[in-house]
Image (cartoon, rainbow, N blue to C red):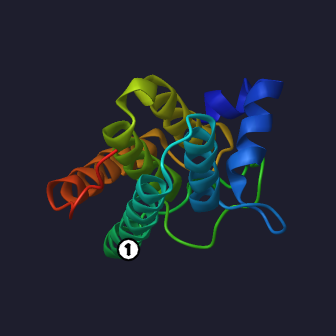
Amino acid sequence: MLHALKHISPEQINQVIFWAGNPSTVTPPGIWLIFANDYMNLHQIELEKALYVRSILAMGIADSVIAVFNSKYTYWVKRPFMREPSIHTIMPTPNHPSYPAGHSTLSATAETLLSYFFPENSAKWKNLASIASEGRVWGGIHFPIDVEQGGLLGDKVGEAIISQLPYLPEE
């Protein structure tokens, strides 16, 4: 994490800021909904399916946030700056425990769900989730294990939702 902060590129800084969800910006759940909307509009997905996908995606993101905060307040892992006060982060550090990373959890859930509905775009969804996750390490607010385990938790949330999906509209 210290190496990532020391060698961060301008593009990585831009990604950290994009995904930060700072005041007056769209937060990561909204970013994922925008990605889904843009994809469905571009590919002219029928309204009924688009609404269904958007609803499942929003529900999945909400479920992943519940799971991640349950974990954060179970394990109470300190943030990097709490262990090493000399760390200067790219963005403000959130005021909650570090492990697991929320961005990784909700992004993995979004990626899992969107890859299920639109497998032809799976590589792009995976790349976006990876950038959202790694940006938390680049920015100095998470340890690599936070994003790794957050991704695994998010995958599990997405898989649980897929296994329980209600009626899928016909195309």
Classify the position of the N terminus by image quarter.
Answer: top right
**In the displayed structure, would residue 74 be above or below residue 82?**
below
Label 1 SS: helix
Q: Nearer the viewer, residue 20 or 143?
A: 20
**In the displayed structure, would residue 13 be above or below residue 62?**
above
Horizontal side of 4 relative to 123 (left or right) equals: right
**Residue positioned 64% across, 51% down in the render:** 34
Answer with the quarter of the image where residue 145 lies.
Answer: top left
Task: Look at the image and tell me whether residue 48 can be seen.
Answer: yes
Q: Nearer the viewer, residue 164 or 91?
A: 164
**Residue positioned 81% across, 69% down in the render:** 23
- Residue at label 1? 66
**Residue positioned 55% across, 47% down in the render:** 36
Answer with the quarter of the image where residue 83 lies.
Answer: bottom right
Classify the position of the C terminus by image quarter.
Answer: top left
Q: Nearer the viewer, residue 44 or 124?
A: 44
Q: Mark 1 belongs to which amino acid?
A: Ile
Number of labelled discs? 1
Task: Look at the image and tell me whether residue 82 can be seen.
Answer: no
Residue that lies at the very extreme toward the left in this rendered image? 163
**Residue positioned 80% across, 61% down in the render:** 25
Q: Where is residue 150 drawn, in percent x and y? A: 38, 51
Q: Where is residue 59 drawn, in percent x and y? A: 39, 68
Q: Nearer the viewer, residue 50 or 155?
A: 50
